[in-house]
Image (cartoon, rainbow, N blue to C red):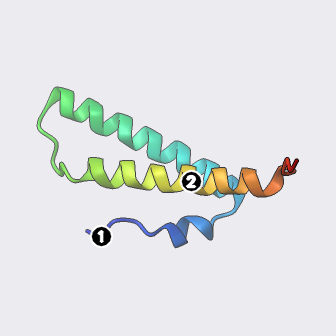
Amino acid sequence: MALPNIADARKLGDEELATEILATKQRLFQLRFQQATRRPENPHEFKHARHRLAQLLTVERERQLENSPSEEA
């Protein structure tokens, strides 16, 4: 399974992005819980979920910076 592509995250709308961030955080929680209670089925999912969350948060931050007025001295 390949790592998610950031271009896919950039195509999402603002509401879809927020929903995807929440879903990814919930998935990470489930994976941590699964790891604590039993052996995870796919250990590589941690890496993919963390990578995806970082991409989504990066896109969210880029949009915040685009929409905010820049402070130039």
Horizontally, residue 6 falls left or right of residue 40, namely right
Q: Residues within 10 Å of mark 1 (few under 14, many from 20)?
A: few
Counting from the top left corner in percent of width and height, residue 66 is at 77, 58
Q: Residue at 19% of width from left, 34% of height from top? A: 35
Tell me: residue 3, above or below residue 17. Answer: below
Q: Residues within 10 Å of mark 2 (few under 14, many from 20)?
A: some
Q: Residue at 27% of width from left, 52% of height from top? A: 45
Query: Which amino acid type is marked by label 2?
Result: Thr
Q: Which mark is residue 58?
A: 2
Q: Which mark is residue 50?
A: none
**Local secondary structure at mark 2:** helix
Q: What residue sits right under mark 1 in the picture?
A: 2
Counting from the top left corner in percent of width and height, residue 58 is at 56, 53
Counting from the top left corner in percent of width and height, residue 61 is at 65, 50
Horizontally, residue 40 falls left or right of residue 28, namely left
- Judge depth for marks 1 and 2 and give the one in front: 2
Q: CA distance from mark 1 to mark 2?
A: 19 Å
Tell me: residue 1, above or below residue 49. Answer: below
The residue positioned farthest toward the front in the image shown: 73
Q: Residue at 61% of width from left, 67% of height from top? A: 10
Quarter of the N terminus within the rendering: bottom left
Query: Which amino acid type is marked by label 1?
Result: Ala
**Local secondary structure at mark 1:** loop
Number of numbered discs: 2
Horizontally, residue 31 falls left or right of residue 13, namely left
Q: Residue at 86% of width from left, 50% of height from top? A: 72
Q: Are marks 1 and 2 in contact (CB under 8 Å)?
A: no
Counting from the top left corner in percent of width and height, residue 41 is at 15, 48
The residue positioned farthest toward the left in the image shown: 39
Q: Which badge, 1 or 2, comes first in the chain's sequence?
A: 1
Horizontally, residue 63 falls left or right of residue 55, namely right
Q: Nearer the viewer, residue 67 or 70?
A: 70
